[in-house]
Amino acid sequence: MPVDMELEMFLRPKQYPMPPYPPKMITLANGKKMVVRQAKREDVPAILKSVHPCMFIKRDYYDIVSARLYGELLAFYYHRSKSQFVLMGQVDGFLVGVVNSRMENEKVGMSYHTLAIDRGLRIGSHLFAAKMEYHMEYLNQESVLIVAESPIGFRRWMVEYPLEATTIPHELGGGDSYQLTRDIYFKAKPRLVAGVRPVPQDLLDEAEAEIKFADDDTIRERIAGLKGR
Amino acid sequence: MRDVAIIGAGMIPFGRRDEDTLLEMLSYASLKALDDAGMGDKKVDAVYVGNMGAGILQHQSSIASSLVDRLSLLPAAADVVENGPASGGSALKNGFLAVASGYYDYVLVVGGEKMREVTGWRATDFVATMTHPEVEYPYGITLPGMAGMFTQLYMEKWGVTREHLLAVTLKNQEMGALNPYAHVEMTLSRDGIFDSPDAVVNNPYAASPLHLYDLCPVSDGAAAVILCPLDVAKKRGKACVQIVGFGQATDTHTLQEREDPTDLKAVTLASQQALEMAKLKPSDISVAELHDAFTILEIAESEHVGFFKKGEGGKAAAAGKTRLGGQIPINVSGGLKARGHPVGGTGVAQVVDIVFQLRHELPENRQVKDAKTGLTINFGGFGNNVTCFVLKRIEP
Amino acid sequence: MKKREIPIIAFKCKKCGRIHYPFHDRCLTCLSRDFEKIHPQGNAKLLTFSAIFNLPWGFDQRFLIIGIAEFENKVKVMGQIKADSIDELQTGMTVLPTWEPVRVKDGENIYGVKFEPIK
């Protein structure tokens, strides 16, 4: 499809400047090393390959989270969302989780989604924490607005941080937002934000070389199989 | 009293069985045990179902009646046996006594639970209903919380350390990863849950001083056995397993009323009764399945049963004495920690795992070599109602 | 009711002196059915405790510290502990008992014992 760049100038939102998120490495409970890094726009097609099968998994609201994330990633790819960022986790090059969010304005962040493609290792929790780390420590924002679609998300964010209830509407259109403030973030950081920098070069090279994706059945089994945790 | 044999054993994989109802799980496990026993169209006289929470979790009652109907075992006598997380052990006791008494010849005992039907909040609340309704439950106490308070004291009195607990976690996860029936088929690394800076985040407190990976998962699952008189079993010409010892004992409902809360009297008494009946000593046991809902319990039970002296269980675990090939292999199945803990199913699952061991049918990496005797501890409440079985291999 | 009054009734066996809480129809030691009603007295000694995460339905806080303490007249009671962290606690320390809401059920406060470390 040809792109009319003159028209695009009207369709593409203005972006806030965003310093890059420096990659980090997290040692998971099984000893594997997860590289957490920022996705570039060109990474989106590879990420979508892992998100797609999750759209058909009903367990724990994976369908709604993945379907919405899929759309948001396309918006990021086609320059249709304002100041969105995407972070991803990779183990042995394989994509194990994706989170996205955006800057509502310079002070306020709007958290979108957290998708763990492998389970039982707190990958979702680690990536959500990385997303908050980016908002607070690199984008220097005052607060982030958050809602949860699944009870697991509610427990992980609202209870574990714990987030503050507000009456501010959230862009995703669900319940009122909960809010992460700088004060809450820095208090929770030692408990919830993991990872070391810099990432050893060989691991970073492996992660950047290719975003590998497991086949649909493997992904479905990991998330919704008998051993799903 | 007649001698009683287990001639059939079956289990379905534990985990999150969203697609199956509780009745289906009980039914699948029962069919596996019936087929394993080669029952064909032979009549089953009675069925005992171990289940703790169908009334609360599934809003369903009389599941034993539903099960015999579904399995076409009518008009077999059928009862549900509820004894908290020791419901499975208690159901097996009823089956054992029924055959031993001479009243019934063929008995099916099945234990199961479907806990993942509800959220974690509800499941935690469900399990907490076994605490005292007036002086414990209202405070928000949970079973992990009871275990936390127990661990605090046990560490202080008996010198158990986090290293000791870690040894149990790593061993049971390693063995669970080899067990196709286990809920958590995943090894954990010392680095990931203890040594690395990220371990603080990966493995936070769950109920201090216990951490997340000191706790068993919340599982769906079911397991079943078929019992008959030993003389009938012997005519089959195959190796079988005899229930040579049984014991059960209770202790105060609340932890606070125990003279020494670190003393698991019911475990000591139940295992003494069972070993005495079997005319065996702890050192005669080849393999044990202990109720490790929390890692501390594997250590404490290994001492109370008499495998190790008080204060030595943790050191023994860290020294590898409870591993496959060690002095007394404990929870070679992965235990509750990895196989999972569908509360009403656990007591039967432990016995099924010992039956597999005593029939020498497990792969080399899980089989205790030449296993002749096995012991199980099924721990109800927080140690207030405990069952123990001693099983023995009977050569063909 | 004042926060310092603890309206718990414990039961002292008139025959052997064993103290029971909660109530038992027969003494756990001597089987006697004759009890004297007693109230917990004075401060308490913390016997054990645990900071519990993943709380049951009905609690929306991140964690709760629960412990068992022994009053000066030997009544042992479970209660919630008013502390920000277990770092403030150790077994054997003296705690101040109070009677306060411990949970909400059907919109109503349920009262129970809370223990506060005495600094």
Image (cartoon, helix red, strand yellow):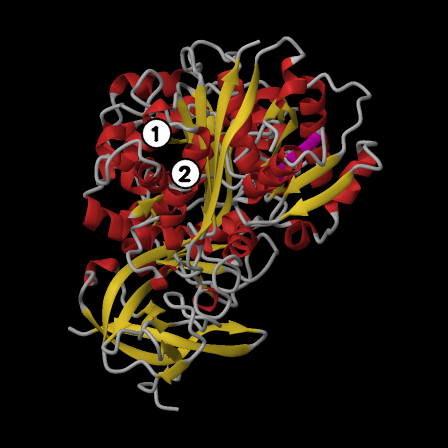
- As drawn, is C104 to the left or to the right of B314? right
Dot 2 falls on a residue whose secondary structure is helix
- As drawn, is B263 to the left or to the right of B344? left
How many labels, in total?
A: 2
Residue at screen point 59% across, 37% down: B92
Q: Is residue A27 visible?
A: no
- As drawn, is B126 to the left or to the right of B305? right
Spatial CA span between label 2 and label 1: 9 Å
Query: Residue C16 falls in which quadrant of the image?
Result: bottom left
| Screen quadrant of the C terminus of chain C | bottom left
**Which segment is the magenta one?**
B107-112
Task: Say what amino acid the circle numbered 1 marks.
Answer: Pro
Within 10 angstroms of label 1, few (less than 14), some, or many (20 or more) residues?
some
Whole-percent x, y for residue B296 in the image? 33, 41
Task: Say what amino acid the circle numbered 2 marks.
Answer: Ser
Protein chain holding label 2: B
User: Residue furthest toward the left?
Assistant: C119
In the figure, A32 relative to C70: above or below? Answer: above
Q: Which sits in the foreground, A223 or B339?
A: B339
Q: Is residue B317 magenta?
A: no
In the figure, B155 relative to B307: above or below? Answer: below
Label disc, if present, on residue B14 of the rendered structure: none
Query: Earlier along the polypeptide chain: callout 2 or callout 1?
Result: 2
The residue labelled by disc 2 is B271
Protein chain holding label 1: B
Residue at screen point 74% across, 36% down: B46
Whole-percent x, y for residue A118 in the image? 49, 30
Whole-percent x, y for residue C106 in the image? 59, 74
**Majority SS type along the magenta span:** strand
Label disc, if present, on residue B282 of the rendered structure: 1
Within 10 angstroms of label 2, few (less than 14), some, or many (20 or more) residues?
many
| Screen quadrant of the N terminus of chain C | bottom left
